[in-house]
Image: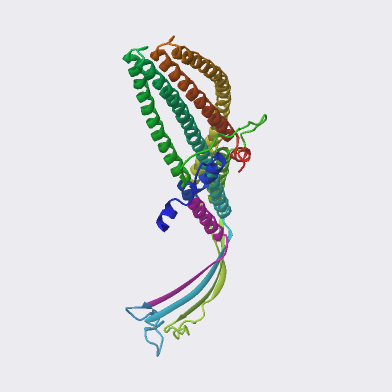
């Protein structure tokens, strides 16, 4: 049971879209992105650590093959030409502190880049959630449309079943031939097969929705009435913000490449001991205490113009990103305008679908009356029932498409705007 709860932590029956959208947060893809964000946070903390002092400890033991000595090339009375100048056994112990006083802005650039990289991952997560919302809306609407199609098929089956009973009664009284009864029976079996197919389709859609939300969804409710804002901007989109964040990372890369033009200054201080034992009391020739404080300055003078090439490469990368962002925003706006036009076309299609449904309902009532008065054939009645069922299914499908299209437009504007309008 515990394993089942881990796999399916939430059970939803007759879920409304707001509940389904909320469950998107439990998607495995988003959880993977959360771990990536935590990793980027640690990279950022690691980069900030480079701006602090560093403490290193070391211990070295050296056993020389020969005794260190000094040779005298000028003869001196009572002195040997060669005498000891150090111990064969030497130990060095050191605790060193270093602080990067100036790195040519390399460290600050790395910290900024790590910070923007973390921000990029956060925005990518938001954009991933935007796409998951759209997928959830599409699956949810398709499931609602299939439910409506099932209901239309069930109503058609009831109507056809009543007509079959009347046809059998007419046949017993020898008012209609057997072919009329068989015609209705054939259509009845065809509708039952279609109903079975729609039930399988509904189960498949619910399974996909359950996988997407990492929840067990057994059925769905109705479609939400979504409204669109009159004025909007696409600058709040997570993917566009992510692109601007990557542009800031490109700027940090330029500063990082330029850091090689500057000298590097490091402050140094160390507690250092030397000796022929681990007590570090010297060896009789050199002092045991070799502690020091100082600085190191390093500057590259020439490296074959490699640094200049790196700066130019980083600059062109930034220019490429700027051009891509401009093109991407134009593409988003074009897609948004196209989707709004598609929405208007769907609204018009919905209006005609409603009129078609009214017409098919009237035609069915007329055909039904004519059949009961033996003025219409069973084939004509079957076709009128099928046409009515198709008109109901068509209207449900158009309503589902309108819901998805509105959700798509809202998500193309802003994820937060979409969440606000569905009550999250």
Classify residue 5 by image quadrant: bottom left
Is residue 329 shown left or right of residue 166? right
Compare residues 199 and 241 and report the one nearer the observer. 199
Residue 8 drawn above or below residue 291 = above
Is any part of residue 400 visible from this angle?
A: yes
Q: Could you tell me residue 125's position as x and y percent?
A: 52, 45
Instruction: Indicate the quadrant containing the C terminus: top left, top right, bottom left or bottom right.
Output: top right
Q: Residue furthest front?
A: 173
Residue 348 drawn above or below residue 4 = above
Q: Could you tell me residue 213's position as x and y percent?
A: 48, 44
Q: Could you tell me residue 99's position as x and y percent?
A: 57, 64
Q: Residue furthest right?
A: 231
Is residue 17 shown left or right of residue 32? right
Compare residues 44 and 127 and report the one nearer the observer. 127
Is any part of residue 314 visible from this angle?
A: no
Q: Could you tell me residue 165's position as x and y percent?
A: 40, 22
Classify residue 205 by image quadrant: top left
What segment is highlighted magenta in the picture?
A: 34-61
**Is 384 included in the stretch rendered in magenta?**
no
Q: How is the image coloured?
A: rainbow
């Amino acid at each position: 049971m515990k394993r089942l709860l881990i796999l399916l932590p939430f059970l939803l029956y007759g879920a409304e879209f707001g509940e389904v959208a909320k469950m998107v947060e439990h998607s495995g893809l988003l959880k993977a992105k959360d771990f990536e964000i935590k990793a980027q946070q640690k990279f950022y903390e690691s980069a900030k650590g480079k701006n602090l002092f560093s403490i290193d400890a070391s211990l070295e033991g050296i056993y020389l093959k020969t005794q260190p000595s000094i040779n005298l090339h000028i003869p001196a009375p009572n002195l040997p030409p060669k005498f000891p100048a150090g111990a064969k056994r030497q130990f060095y112990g050191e605790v060193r502190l270093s602080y990067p006083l100036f790195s040519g802005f390399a460290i600050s650039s790395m910290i900024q880049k790590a910070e923007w990289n973390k921000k990029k991952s956060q925005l990518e997560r938001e954009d991933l959630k935007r796409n998951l919302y759209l997928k959830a809306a599409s699956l949810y609407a398709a499931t609602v449309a299939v439910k409506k199609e099932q209901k239309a098929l069930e109503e058609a089956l009831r109507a056809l079943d009543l007509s079959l009973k009347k046809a059998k009664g007419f046949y017993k009284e020898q008012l209609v031939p057997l072919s009329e009864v068989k015609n209705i029976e054939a259509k009845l079996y065809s509708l039952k097969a279609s109903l079975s197919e729609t039930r399988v389709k509904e189960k498949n859609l619910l399974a996909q929705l359950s996988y997407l939300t990492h929840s067990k969804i057994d059925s769905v409710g109705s479609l939400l009435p979504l409204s669109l804002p009159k004025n909007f901007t696409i600058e709040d989109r997570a993917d566009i913000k992510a692109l601007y964040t990557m542009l800031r990372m490109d700027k940090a890369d330029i500063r990082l490449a330029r850091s090689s033009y500057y000298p590097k200054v490091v402050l140094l201080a160390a507690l250092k001991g030397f000796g022929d034992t681990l007590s570090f009391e010297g060896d009789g020739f050199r002092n045991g205490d070799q502690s020091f404080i100082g600085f190191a300055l390093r500057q590259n003078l020439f490296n074959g113009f490699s640094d200049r090439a790196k700066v130019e490469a980083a600059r062109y990368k930034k220019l490429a990103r700027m051009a891509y962002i401009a093109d991407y925003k134009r593409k988003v706006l074009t897609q948004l305008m196209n989707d709004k036009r598609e929405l208007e076309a769907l609204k018009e299609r919905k209006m005609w679908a409603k009129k078609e449904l009214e017409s098919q309902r009237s035609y069915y009532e007329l055909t039904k009356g004519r059949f009961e008065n033996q003025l219409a054939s069973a084939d004509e009645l079957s076709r009128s029932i099928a046409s009515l069922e198709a008109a109901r299914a068509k209207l449900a499908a158009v309503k589902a498409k309108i819901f998805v299209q509105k959700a798509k437009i809202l998500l193309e504007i802003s994820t937060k705007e979409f969440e606000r309008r569905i009550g999250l």
